Image (cartoon, helix red, strand yellow):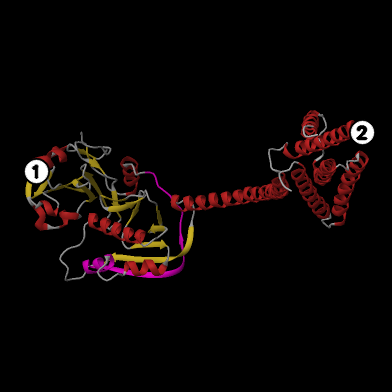
Amino acid sequence: MGRSNIYISMAAVCFVLGIMLALQYKANYTNDLWPSQESQQTVQTERLRKQNDELINEIALLQDKLSQSNERVLISEVNKMLDKATICGGLSKVTGPGVTIHYYFAPASNLLYSPTLEMQAKDLLIIINELRSAGAEAISINNHRLLATSPIYYRGNSITVNNHNVSAPYEIRAIGNPDVIYSSLRLKGGEVDNLILLGYKVDIEKNKTIDIPAFTASPPPSPTTDLSRIRQKVPFAVIIPTNVPDGLAPASPLLNPGPPASVSIYYLSETGSSGLLVINSPAGSGLAADERKTGEAIVLRNNISGHFLKNHPEFGGPILWWEESGTYVALSGPQLTKEDLAEIANSMSSDADIRQGSE
Amino acid sequence: MWFVVPLFLAIGFLGGIYLPVILPVYLTKYLAVAILAALDSVVGGVRAYQEGNYNSIVLITGFVTNSLLAAVLAFIGDQLGVALYIAAVLAFGVRIFQNLAIFRRDFLVKTGLVH
């Protein structure tokens, strides 16, 4: 009994120890971790979870701020774009610092030529180009607002901007940095210097505030309405060719107030050069007033006696003039012959409407 | 005796594994020092058996009280913030090695490998 006592107690103690070991093992190794690591991991997990929560809060806060500022930034960006587009589109009046240019052609006695309309229009374009490259934001010529799409076109007797007629003296206003624009214009040997050499008189003025009006376009002039308008204004009959040489289209008839009043109609070819010029003015004016300009006699319709003058093309070509119904009429065209002019003259009438030659 | 200890250790171990009890994680520390104390009792019992002074009452009471005392000491130490479990570890660790040494010497002398 004593011996088995030993065995029994020992066995019992070992059994209990075994259970304790098993429990400890189970408790420690259920997480696939060594026990020493586990405490570290727990601490770290706790720390990371706290950090995570803080970061989530921060994210929410920042997102809120971002959406707010996004809206504000978006709105201000859109507003900026709108302002820019309005200025470029010329929809509104613009005010700001800038430069005013007055220039006109001042013929000096020692100059042999005066610039044609084409040259004047091109000089205008040169100045506008200089202004644009100097950063002008809004430009107007004789108070007509210039857009990026505004044509400067020479037509017959005058230059048109946005289908408005402009004539010398030209006042160009530009809004931008006054110093930059002024110095770029007055560059030694620059465009302005060239113009002055050509005989233009150019005055540039820096201004603190300049007003430039909004863009307005008058409807393109239709020669017929202009003609009827002019007919009402002049005391003489306006006599118009009904047979126009091929390829010529009439520009708007121009009224020169004179005195004496005169109406000129340029018929332009496709390239824009003048193919025929018809001038009407009161009888006794124009070449009729000059005894030397009788020229070669020609008989026209209705027994009208016309006068033909040979003339070099660079001076406008041959001229055929006569008087009928109290109107002095003159035709000229650089490429036209005496026969062409006579044909045209014989087709003219005081009731005719303006028309163009066939293509 | 030589097969009792490992056999019943193994049986107890297997039984513990299949026991549906899972110890809460915070108790593992205390169980660890209790195991140390229990181990010391077992080694002491083996030594006593070798010497011939085996007393089962001493064995069992020593086993129970030492284990309990070790766990309680560790617990109190945690509450106080002092690592009192170290005392248990030291004490029982030393005793295990001592008992083992005594047993070994006695065993070797008794079996004639050493005089």
* Outermost residue, left side: A296
SS at badge 1: loop
Of mark 2 and mark 1, the one earlier in the sequence is 2
**Does residue B89 appear to the left or right of A256 in the view shown?**
right
Q: Which amino acid does label 1 sit on?
A: Thr
Considering depth in this image, is A114 or A226 the residue closer to the camera? A114
Q: Which residue carries the number 2 mark?
A: A2
Q: Which sits in the foreground, A211 or A156?
A: A211
Residue at which label 1 appears = A337
Q: Where is residue B79 in the image (x, y as percent from the top left)?
A: 87, 53
Residue A340, by quadrant, is top left
The question of residue A196 being in magenta is answered with: yes
Which amino acid, by three-letter code, is at mark 2? Gly
> Is residue A124 among the parts visible in the rendering?
yes
Which residues lie in the magenta part?
A191-219
Residue B87 tag number: none
As displayed, is residue A256 above or below residue A108?
above
Pointer 2 chain: A
Quarter of the figure with the N terminus of chain A: top right
